[in-house]
Each structure stands twice: as structure tokens, then as C-alpha cells.
Amino acid sequence: MSDGLVVALSGGVGGAKLALGLSRALPARDLLVIANTGDDFEHLGLSISPDIDTLMYALAGVDNPATGWGRRDETWSFMDSIAALGGADWFRLGDRDLATHVERTRRLRAGETLSQVTADFCRRLGIGPRLLPMSDDRVRTRVQSDGGWIDFQDYFVRQQCRPVVRKLAFDGAAAARPQPEVLAALRGGGLRAIVICPSNPFISIEPILAVPGLRDAIAQSGVPVVAVSPIIGGRAVKGPTAKMMQELGLEASAAGVARHYGDLLSVYVAEPDDAASLAGLRLKVVAAPTLMTSLADREALARVVLDAADARRRAA
Ligand code: GDP
């Protein structure tokens, strides 16, 4: 007997940690992970989907624990060789990882959708839960800095998040269609909870919510929407979330993230030391350790999230 479907919204590194925890706490059929594709780009002639790949490798247990992205036991012959030829080497593509991009690119060119390619890769990697892109249509995050608009990976990887972020845009989002299975899952009966993983709210979660229909479907789902704070003690665990919040004129804190999500949330899970600062907000706050270092941490946080959602549902 199923307890219902849990739909998790996720970016890459932080999101994939909780997605893995959820995959260990739930039967495979009860978890659907929606991946951000705003970070996707074309590079060296290849279609690269960084968040899908981080999630896929984490769920398959072949991720690189040292970097949080890419595959474990990686070798770098391709990168060394392309650098020797004067090619672009600012975006690191390991030899094993490269196979994913080459095969994805071939299949997309042959007419498969990103969802179909992702589902088949997941099946071949032995992943039980469903992992789907937010849309099969092209959405590209762009960053406005003092020097003008730049592509997301130029900002994130080539310039190592150094440019000051003034504004973000999600090119193509307004015309993108939500992935049909994703929309059906959010609108269908049998939902247990929606989880917003501890991902960057602005560049990992916002692009998902920008796809027409998805934000409304989440807001109208009637089930608890539980977010985990990606900010602990005013700092991001990894990446530019706190820096970006300051640059966008927001308070870089767990409360700042909760205010950003606003009415969409019904439950917010934050570090015990941050919980007091959340007292004034109109949402249920659950204090729990949110730093996921070990596999046990990931699973424990997933269980906190599920318990919080179920308690909220019972109380409603
Ligand atoms: P990206 O797409 O690779 O940038 O990955 P995400 O957006 O999914 O993850 C980046 C966010 O994850 C950052 O804001 C980090 O603070 C957060 N993060 C990473 N690890 C953890 C963790 O163990 N716990 C929590 N609460 N947040 C984390």
C-alpha cells in the first residue's frame, strides 16, 4: 500500500543530497524528482544538463563525493587532450561523464526528448525513482551583471560566480511547456507532499517555478509544501546562494529564503540555531540538523521532511 507520491524540486549539489535521502526513505514508485534545466547549455557541440546529471549520478551512487558534481573514479584524458589542442577547458568534462553528454546529444538529435533520454539513462543506471526535467523545451538562465547579460555557465563556472548578480532571467521559460508527467503528478490525486530541496532558490528552484503551470499546480496541490533551507547560519554550504542574496538586496539567511518562497510553503525545515529567527513567519517551522555530510544524514533529513509533511497534513 502506497502512502502517496512525493514530488521533489531540485537543482544539483544540495538538492541531490536530499533526493538521495528521499530515495532511501521511500519506495521507488513514491518519489518523483523534478530537475532544473535552466543550467543546461551547449558546449563543445554537446548538450549538457548539469543538474540532471548530478541527480542521476547521486541516485545511482556513482557521483563524485569530493566535488559534488561529475562521476567518481573519473579520469581526465579528454580534458588534457582538448586543452593541448587549444580547445575550451574551462568546463571540466571527465572521460566517464563525457559519455553521458555524447550519448544524450546523439539521442536528442535523433528526435528523443530530454525526458525520454533521462528516463532511459536512469533505467540503465539502475535508478528506481522517476527523475524528469521540468520541461522538454529549452530554458536558459541568464545573469545580468554590471557588464551586461551573460550565460549562466559563463557566470557560474568560467567566472566562478565573481560577477555581481543584479538580475536573473530564464530565457524560453514563458513559452516552455511543463513536462507532461510532472504536471499530471502535481495535479493528480495520490500526492503526499511536495518537497523543495535545499537548492539555490534563485537559480535552481526559480527556473522550475517559472515554467507556466508549475507554480500554480504546486500552490493548488492541496498537499504540504515543505522546503529545506539551503542557508545555515547565514552561509551557503556550497556555492553562491548567500552572495547572490546579498547582491539581490535580500537578507542572506534561512528567513530570507523562507520569505522568498512566501505563501508557496507550508512547512520550513531549518537548522535549530536558525529556527528562532523564523518565529515571525506565517509557516510551520521544524528545527532539525540540515547539514548532510553522510548518507545517514541524507536519509535522516528526508525522514524529518516526510514526518513534517505528514504531521501538517493530519493537522489540516
Ligand atoms: P547547484 O545546481 O549545483 O548549484 O546545486 P543546488 O542549487 O541544488 O545546491 C546549492 C545549494 O545547496 C547551496 O545553497 C548550498 O548551501 C546548499 N547545500 C549544499 N549542501 C547542503 C547541505 O548539506 N545541507 C543544506 N541544508 N544545504 C546544502
Image (tube, rainbow, N blue to C red):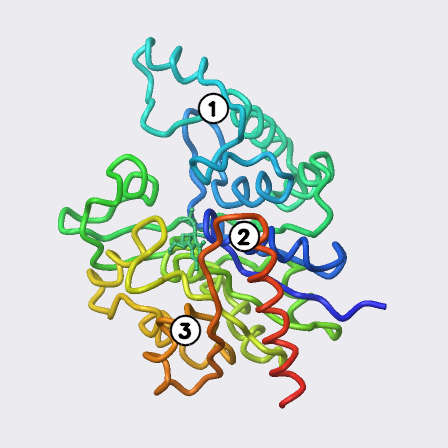
The C terminus lies in quadrant: bottom right
Instruction: Say what amino acid the circle numbered 3 marks.
Output: Tyr
Instruction: Say what amino acid the circle numbered 1 marks.
Output: Gly
Instruction: Check disc 2: other Cα within 10 Å, few if <14, some if 14-19, many if 20+.
Output: many
Residue at image location 59% in from the left, 60% down from the top: 300
**Nearer-N-terminus badge (2/1):** 2
Q: The residue tagged with tag 2: helix, strand or loop? A: strand
x, y percent for residue 135: 56, 54
Q: CA distance from mark 3 to mark 1?
A: 36 Å
Instruction: Check disc 3: other Cα within 10 Å, few if <14, some if 14-19, many if 20+.
Output: some
Front position in the image: 73 or 181: 73
x, y percent for residue 133: 57, 51
Instruction: Check disc 1: other Cα within 10 Å, few if <14, some if 14-19, many if 20+.
Output: some
The vertical placement of 229 against 96, above or below, is below
Q: CA distance from mark 2 to mark 1?
A: 22 Å
Residue at image location 33% in from the left, 14% down from the top: 83
x, y percent for residue 151: 31, 43
Q: As drawn, which residue projects farthest toward the left?
A: 146
x, y percent for residue 305: 58, 69
Would you say residue 134 is visible in this rendering? Answer: no
Which mark identifies residue 261?
Answer: 3
The residue where tag 2 is placed is 35
For residue 272, side relative to residue 114 (left or right): left
**Nearer-N-terminus badge (2/3):** 2
Ligand 1 neighbours mark 2 (CB distance < 8 Å): no
Residue at image location 74% in from the left, 75% down from the top: 189
Camera-side mark, 2 or 1: 1
The N terminus lies in quadrant: bottom right
For residue 137, side relative to residue 1 (left or right): left
Which mark identifies residue 94?
Answer: 1
